[in-house]
Image: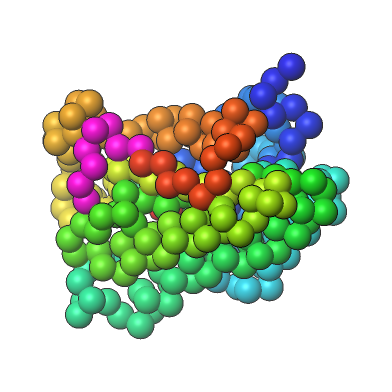
């Protein structure tokens, strides 16, 4: 008997660094996984739902599409995210709309659509991927930090409001994770990603930055029955480096 036998998962950002590791882990543990991302070519899973989370019609209908195709929806992981860099005065209208749209509005829409389906089926679990920077902002990423703080607050609100319906809503707040999001940022700023990751690792008390698998294990715990009393929790996963 595997931990997620018989469970159905909706996972956004399924093609990204953390998302791909989550997809594999949930399936290895028995879940059927519906993958959502802009491009899912070559992704092997139980259901592929490609689309743009900035499209409200797509985000609003993802939960029912999973329920209709796979016969249920037990777990939602709002993992997709974008990072825009800069201070407020360096932030364009496009960056603002993109960040709010992907990091806040899409999880809001998906949760709003998923919660009634989960409640009708007797309950479920939602895990949002926020960030340490949503708890304590870091420099020069004003709008990213704000969106992750918004997602953290939304998680706490939903955790309270829907616990009575048997739906546990929690968030994981990672610090730096070795994924394309982090590595492309280094590359854009002219750093060689492998050495930049190694240098950054020296600033973390545990001696390295997180790998996607470090985050995956916490997400799986929060999605599982082992986390039966966690509702609205913001779980920081930071290798001992709590500052932004
Ligand atoms: P990633 O860039 O590797 O993956 C993000 C995924 O989201 C991509 O597959 C991308 O296609 C998808 N996505 C983005 N915009 C989309 C849109 N409009 N429609 C559909 N899909 C879209 O990033 P990651 O590092 O794996 O990040 C996963 C989550 O973890 C994000 O929410 C991120 O903010 C959070 N996080 C990452 C770090 C880090 O250091 N990597 C730290 C803290 C939090």
Q: Position of residue 229 (x, y in %)?
A: 58, 37
The residue drawn where x is 19% and y is 33% is: 204
The residue drawn where x is 42% and y is 65% is: 150
Say whether residue 102 is magenta. Answer: no
Task: Provide the residue span drawn in magenta.
Answer: 237-244
Q: Of helix, strand and loop, which mostly describes the magenta segment?
A: loop
Of residues 178 and 72, the one drawn nearer to the viewer in this rendering: 72
The residue drawn where x is 34% and y is 57% is: 134
Q: Quadrant of the N terminus?
A: top right
Residue 190, compared with residue 27, is above or below; it is below
Give the farthest residue toward the bottom: 93
Residue 19 in view of the camera:
yes
Of residues 162 and 8, the one drawn nearer to the viewer in this rendering: 162
The residue drawn where x is 22% and y is 68% is: 86
Residue 26 in view of the camera:
no
Residue 210, compared with residue 38, is above or below; it is above
């Amino acid at each position: 008997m595997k931990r997620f036998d018989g469970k159905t998962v909706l996972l956004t950002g399924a093609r990204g660094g953390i998302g791909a590791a989550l997809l594999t882990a949930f399936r290895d543990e028995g879940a059927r996984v519906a993958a959502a991302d802009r491009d899912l070519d070559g992704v092997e899973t139980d259901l592929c739902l490609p689309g743009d989370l900035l499209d409200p019609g797509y985000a609003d209908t993802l939960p029912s599409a999973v329920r209709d195709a796979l016969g249920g929806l037990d777990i939602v992981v709002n993992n997709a995210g974008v990072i825009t860099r800069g201070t407020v005065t360096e932030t364009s209208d496009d960056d603002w709309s993109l960040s709010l749209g992907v990091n806040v509005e899409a999880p809001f829409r998906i949760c709003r659509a998923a919660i009634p389906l989960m409640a009708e089926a007797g309950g479920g679990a939602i895990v949002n991927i926020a960030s340490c920077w949503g708890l304590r902002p870091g420099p020069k990423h004003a709008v990213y930090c704000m969106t992750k703080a918004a997602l953290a607050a939304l998680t706490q609100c939903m955790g309270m409001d829907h616990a009575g319906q048997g739906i546990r809503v929690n968030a994981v707040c990672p610090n730096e994770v070795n994924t394309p999001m982090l590595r492309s940022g280094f590359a854009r700023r002219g750093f060689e990603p492998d050495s930049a990751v190694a240098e950054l690792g020296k600033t973390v008390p545990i001696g390295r930055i997180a790998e996607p698998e470090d985050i995956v294990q916490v997400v799986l715990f929060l999605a599982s029955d082992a986390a039966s009393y966690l509702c609205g929790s913001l779980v920081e996963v930071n290798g001992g480096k709590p500052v932004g």
